[in-house]
Image (tube, helix red, strand yellow):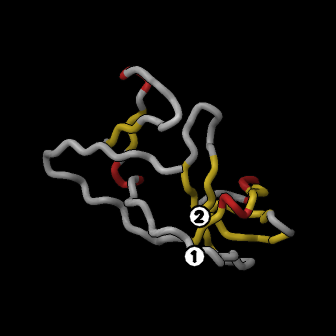
Amino acid sequence: LFRFQALDTQLDDSQLEWVPWDLIRDQPPPAPADFRPKERGVVEVRVQAQPDEPHSWWQARVMMIKGDFCKVRYLGWDQGSDDVVDLADVRPSTGMPPRDRPMCAKHEYGLVG
């Protein structure tokens, strides 16, 4: 397990979250300045799953684009998980594999939002 603390909150040790290693990815390279998602394409969307959780990136398929917004369907979820998001919260899908689990080392990583 991996323990993180949101950058914008000050929590004591009892409030820190443990996350399985298979969900941890390295920070991807910045998206190209001219990136514009395409309908039916797979992207990553920055969302907050619960109000008390930090934002994170979720894979989704772009269903429709209108102006500066797009309708997405999160991969692995049913149609009830469709969401309308600002294009500023969409980046190309990285397809990056999970981080390798350290043998016996402590690692601290800052979250990028």
- Image point (61%, 74%), residue name: 33
In the picture provided, is 101 more to the left or to the right than 105?
Answer: right
Q: Observer-nearest residue: 2 or 7?
A: 7
Amino acid on which disc 2 is placed: Glu
Query: Mark on residue 113?
Result: none
Q: Secondary structure at mark 1?
A: loop
The quadrant holding residue 92 is bottom right
Which of label 1 and label 2 is nearer to you?
1
Q: Is residue 24 above or below residue 96?
A: above
- Image point (63%, 37%), residue name: 50
Amino acid on which disc 1 is placed: Pro
Q: Observer-nearest residue: 58 or 109?
A: 109
Q: Secondary structure at mark 2?
A: strand
Q: Label 2 crowding class (10 Å Cα cut-off): few <14, some 14-19, many 20+?
A: many
- Image point (71%, 79%), residue name: 38
Q: Is residue 95 above or below residue 81?
A: below
Q: Residue beneath label 1, please? A: 32
Residue sticking out furthest to the left: 104
Q: Residue beneath label 2, please? A: 44
Residue sticking out furthest to the front: 33
